[in-house]
Image (spheres, rainbow, N blue to C red):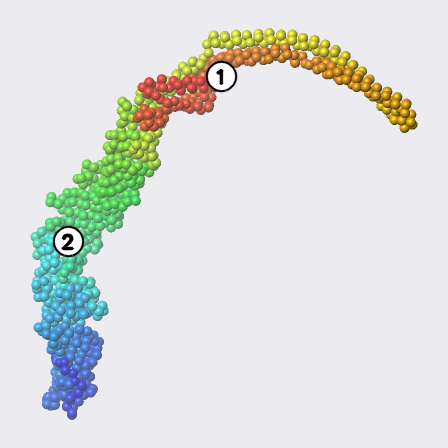
């Protein structure tokens, strides 16, 4: 049983205790029938001590006072605190903001009666005009233990912002209790809120050491009034009643564990709600949502999605005490039997919740669950909100949410994966369903957002294959487009996948034939098969070409477009069209087709094919009337003004023409019969001249031989004379030598006369010797002359030498005459064989091809600028290749005239090659 004991507190503090001198507190209580008192009282001394439980801050208050002897005679114990024994109690009951002074106590006990009274004063935020305020506290006692207390402050206001430990409560700056009652971990009282006076309570959470405030709204209130929202339908949505809770740090626990004041706040008909209370930091509300009392448009929308019964709901709100309005209320819910979207079936066992949401970007009321959306081949699972929403101040009903996982082969398109799909379904004015699904699609290295929009009649089934996922891109590299093509088809795109091109300002759609496209794309996009359709501006090699549209799909690749004028070198290509077409049997090419006037007066078609590193322009041309040819130009980009080289291959019909021209040129090299006859006569004449000269040489040699024989005879006579003179000189030298030797001997013997005679004789011999030696020199000269005359060869005869020189000249003339004759005969033979080779076109002669080269500037300026057009003949003669070139002049002269010069060169080489063969 609970007992409430009144305690009166005052500020005066004393230290002396007055008590009846004859009776102790303990004895007095016994006399009053209380042998044992409450456990929170200590009466072992002449004082009375109150011991407070830990929940109230613990601690003790020791009071000294007097016992009324007269009352004790009547078995009633009365204890009164002396004025000088009054106490000061800071942080009373464990509350830091509650400081008490002049605390006094009176105690009255009798059989069946136990009363305590304390009086005192409280200051701090409770001051009245700057002075402490007198207060009364009630204690709740159960089983002789203090379980609670109540400190009432009538006619007093408590502003929470003035209490340090409460000022962090959300909204505390605008919260104030009037006539508050403070109890264990709680403050109760009245509070002004949105023009209403409400019951309010603040309570302390010991586990988180934080305060929370609850407001009890008993009258209906709109969400607009609650959170300060003045736009859209939610401002008029009504809550019949609600509890508002402002939490500093949040709270989670059983209702039965809350402070008593808070339990009373939540109790309805004396009963607490089931389950736990869970608050988040901020402003929480617990309320009931009743569709029946909502505005007509909201009520109608809620009825469409099957919400007609009241729903208990809780969650958080913002803007209650200022700031941006927001609402997030949610509670477990059962899916209505009919929710207005028959093709969206609730998934069995899916978690479902009712919600009310308000934010900067949305305001909605409805429920969320998981639904199955079936197509022909699969079932898609979406987490969907069925809700009433605000669309530009108009209340509408829609269902929207994200799909679980990614949608592979989305809308029946092989290779298309839609990541993070989101579906939104509305009901239009005709009752049909507007379906929108969007998500992220990978195109090459790009991740782009794509959206599909379609209308489903109420009686129709949902067909994902009818969706077209459309979107836009600033740029789409051609390589990325080709990578996408590989996902949808088996077309061989190796030849074009690396072309330096891109689409800009792209509109695209992944679709199948007949898929629903947005109105603004119907004229832009179309497709054959299933895949990706695009429209945009085509850029290639750094130049803008023009608008192009087409698709990559299961049926292949097709892109067509009329292009703007294109500058290619010195030319401007006008009125051209793009064609990129291919399928599983035909590889696509990046082709631009059109007509141009490369040669004045000749409008001819061209094909410009773009490759990875170069572009090739090709045209079947009359080459200004000169000949028919296939002309090609290669470029590594669209370079305006730059001259570009060309190559041309002449039509095969010109090969036969060229052979005829070559045969005609061969006939020009053939020698006539009169030329050969003259050459034969020249040879005969030369032979006769040589024969005559040979006769003269023989006669001259005979004369020289006779002269030689006569010289030999003179030589023998001269030799004999020299020999004779040599013998005489030798004999006389020996005789002179002997005489001198004998003279020297006689002189030594003093035979001077004899010796003189002998010396004189020797001198005489020496004189003779000198005469003989002079004679011999003459004889020697004569002998030398004779030898020279006798030794001279017959050929050395001047006459013979002159005739032999004449013979050589004649022989050289014969050789020339014979050469002329042989050459004439060889030329005719070579011409015959060459003509035969040209006719048969075998290994002896092969016309490999006829072509032309030069530059576009050379064509356009008739050779005044750039490289003049040149005719080229490529032939093989006896397996040896020869290439001949000749500048082309006036093209109007025609092929026969322009090729005549090269044909003559070829004919000359043919005759040269076949001479002697």
Q: Which residue shows up at 91% across the image and 25% down it?
A: 751
Q: Which residue shows up at 67% across the image and 10% down it?
A: 704
Query: Looking at this view, is 494 or 102 the one in front?
Result: 102
Query: Looking at this view, is 304 or 152 the one in front?
Result: 152
Residue 782 drawn at (x, y percent): 74, 14
Q: CA distance from mark 1 to mark 2?
A: 104 Å
Residue 713 appearing in the image: yes
Instruction: Name above or below for residue 77 compared with residue 590.
Output: below
Instruction: Name above or below for residue 220 compared with residue 83.
Output: above
Q: Give whichever of discs 1 and 2 has the lower sequence position.
A: 2
- The residue indicated by pointer 2 is 363
Q: Quadrant of the N terminus?
A: bottom left
Instruction: Name above or below for residue 722 compared with residue 515.
Output: above
Q: Which of label 1 and label 2 is nearer to you?
A: 1
To which quarter of the image does residue 47 belong? Answer: bottom left
Residue 448 drawn at (x, y percent): 25, 45
Residue 376 drawn at (x, y percent): 23, 43
- Looking at the image, residue 610 sits to the left or right of residue 110; the answer is right
Residue furthest toward the bottom?
A: 22
Residue 166 drawn at (x, y percent): 17, 68
Q: Residues within 10 Å of mark 2 (few under 14, many from 20)?
A: many
To which quarter of the image does residue 471 belong? Answer: top left
- Looking at the image, residue 448 sits to the left or right of residue 76; the answer is right
Residue 148 appearing in the image: no
- Looking at the image, residue 589 sits to the left or right of residue 817; the answer is left
To which quarter of the image does residue 628 belong? Answer: top left
- The residue indicated by pointer 1 is 915
Query: Looking at this view, is 520 or 329 the one in front?
Result: 520
Indicate the secondary structure of the residue bearing disc 2. strand
Instruction: Name above or below for residue 132 compared with residue 891.
Output: below
Q: Which residue shows up at 46% across the image and 11% down it?
A: 671
Count of labels in the image: 2
């Amino acid at each position: 049983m609970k007992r409430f004991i009144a305690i009166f507190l005052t500020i005066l503090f004393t230290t002396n205790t007055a008590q009846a001198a004859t009776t102790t507190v303990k004895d007095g209580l016994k006399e009053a029938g209380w042998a044992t008192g409450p456990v929170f009282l200590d009466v072992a001394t002449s004082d009375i001590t109150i011991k407070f439980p830990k929940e109230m801050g613990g601690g003790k208050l020791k009071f000294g006072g007097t016992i009324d002897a007269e009352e004790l005679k009547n078995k009633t114990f009365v204890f009164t605190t002396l004025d000088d024994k009054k106490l000061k109690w800071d942080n009373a009951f464990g509350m830091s903001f509650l400081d008490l002074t002049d605390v006094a106590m009176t105690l009255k006990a009798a059989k069946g009666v136990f009363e305590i009274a304390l009086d005192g004063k409280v200051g701090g935020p409770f001051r009245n005009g700057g002075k402490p305020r007198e207060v009364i506290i009630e204690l709740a006692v159960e089983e002789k233990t203090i379980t609670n207390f109540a400190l009432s402050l009538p006619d007093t206001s408590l502003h929470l912002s003035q209490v340090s430990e409460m000022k962090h409560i959300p909204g505390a700056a605008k919260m104030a209790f009037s006539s508050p009652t403070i109890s264990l971990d709680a403050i109760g009282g009245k509070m002004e809120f949105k023009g209403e006076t409400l019951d309010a309570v603040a309570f302390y959470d010991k586990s988180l050491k934080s305060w929370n405030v609850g407001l009890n709204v008993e009258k209906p209130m709109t969400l607009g009034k609650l959170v300060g929202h003045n736009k859209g339908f939610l401002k008029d949505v009504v809550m019949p009643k609600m509890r508002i809770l402002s939490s500093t740090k949040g709270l989670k626990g059983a209702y039965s564990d809350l402070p008593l004041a808070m339990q009373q706040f939540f109790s309805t008909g004396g009963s607490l709600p089931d389950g736990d209370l869970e608050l988040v930091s901020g402003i929480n509300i617990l309320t009931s949502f009743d569709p029946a009392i909502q505005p007509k448009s909201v009520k109608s929308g809620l009825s469409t999605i099957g919400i007609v019964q009241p729903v208990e709901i809780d969650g958080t709100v913002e803007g209650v005490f200022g700031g941006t309005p927001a609402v997030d209320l949610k509670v477990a819910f059962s899916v209505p039997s009919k929710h207005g979207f028959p093709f969206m079936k609730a998934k069995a066992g899916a978690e479902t919740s009712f919600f009310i949401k308000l934010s900067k970007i949305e305001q909605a009321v409805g429920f969320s669950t998981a639904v199955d959306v079936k197509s022909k081949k699969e079932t898609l699972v979406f987490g969907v909100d069925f809700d009433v929403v605000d669309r530009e101040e108009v209340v509408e009903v829609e269902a929207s949410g994200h799909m679980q996982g990614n949608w592979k082969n989305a809308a029946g398109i092989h290779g298309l994966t839609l990541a993070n799909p989101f579906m939104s379904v509305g009901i239009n004015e005709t009752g049909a369903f507007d379906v929108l699904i969007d998500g992220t699609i990978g195109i090459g290295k790009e991740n782009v957002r794509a959206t599909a929009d379609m209308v489903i009649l109420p009686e129709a089934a949902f067909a994902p294959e009818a969706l077209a996922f459309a979107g836009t891109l600033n740029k789409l590299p051609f390589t990325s487009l080709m990578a996408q093509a590989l996902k949808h088809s088996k077309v061989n795109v190796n030849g074009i996948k690396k072309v330096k091109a891109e689409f800009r300002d792209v509109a695209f759609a992944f679709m199948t034939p007949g898929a629903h496209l947005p109105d603004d794309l119907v004229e832009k996009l179309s497709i054959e098969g299933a895949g990706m359709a695009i429209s945009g501006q085509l850029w290639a090699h750094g130049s803008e070409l023009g608008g192009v549209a087409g698709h990559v799909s299961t049926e292949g690749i097709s892109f067509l477009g009329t292009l703007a004028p294109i500058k290619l070198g010195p030319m401007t290509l006008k009125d051209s069209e793009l064609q990129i077409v291919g399928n599983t049997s035909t590889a696509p090419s990046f082709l631009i087709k059109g007509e141009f006037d490369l040669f004045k007066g000749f409008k001819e078609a061209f094909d410009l094919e773009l490759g990875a590193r170069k572009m090739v322009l090709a045209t079947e041309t009359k080459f200004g009337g000169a000949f028919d040819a296939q002309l090609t130009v290669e470029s590594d980009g669209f370079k305006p003004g730059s001259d570009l080289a060309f190559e041309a291959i002449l039509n095969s019909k010109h090969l036969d023409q060229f052979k005829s021209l070559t045969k005609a040129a061969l006939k020009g090299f053939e020698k006539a019969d009169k030329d050969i006859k003259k050459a034969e006569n020249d040879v005969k004449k030369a032979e006769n001249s040589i024969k005559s000269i040979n006769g003269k040489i023989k006669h001259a040699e005979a004369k020289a031989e006779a002269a030689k024989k006569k010289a030999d005879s003179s030589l023998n006579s001269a030799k004999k004379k020299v020999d004779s003179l040599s013998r005489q000189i030798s004999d006389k030298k020996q005789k002179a030598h002997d005489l001198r030797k004998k003279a020297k001997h006689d002189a030594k013997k003093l035979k001077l006369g004899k010796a003189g005679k002998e010396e004189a004789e020797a001198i005489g011999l020496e004189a003779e010797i000198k005469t003989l030696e002079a004679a011999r020199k003459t004889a020697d000269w004569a002998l030398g002359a004779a030898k020279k005359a006798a030794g001279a060869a017959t050929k050395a005869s001047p006459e013979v030498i002159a005739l032999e020189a004449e013979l050589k000249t004649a022989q050289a003339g014969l050789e020339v005459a014979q050469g002329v004759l042989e050459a004439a005969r060889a030329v005719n033979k070579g011409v015959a064989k060459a003509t035969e080779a040209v006719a048969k076109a075998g290994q002896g002669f092969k016309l490999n091809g006829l072509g032309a080269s030069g530059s576009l500037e050379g064509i356009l300026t008739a050779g005044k600028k750039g490289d003049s057009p040149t005719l080229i003949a490529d032939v093989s003669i006896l397996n040896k290749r020869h290439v001949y070139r000749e500048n082309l002049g006036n093209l109007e002269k025609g092929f026969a005239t322009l090729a005549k010069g090269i044909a003559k060169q070829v004919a000359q080489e043919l005759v040269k090659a076949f001479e002697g063969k």
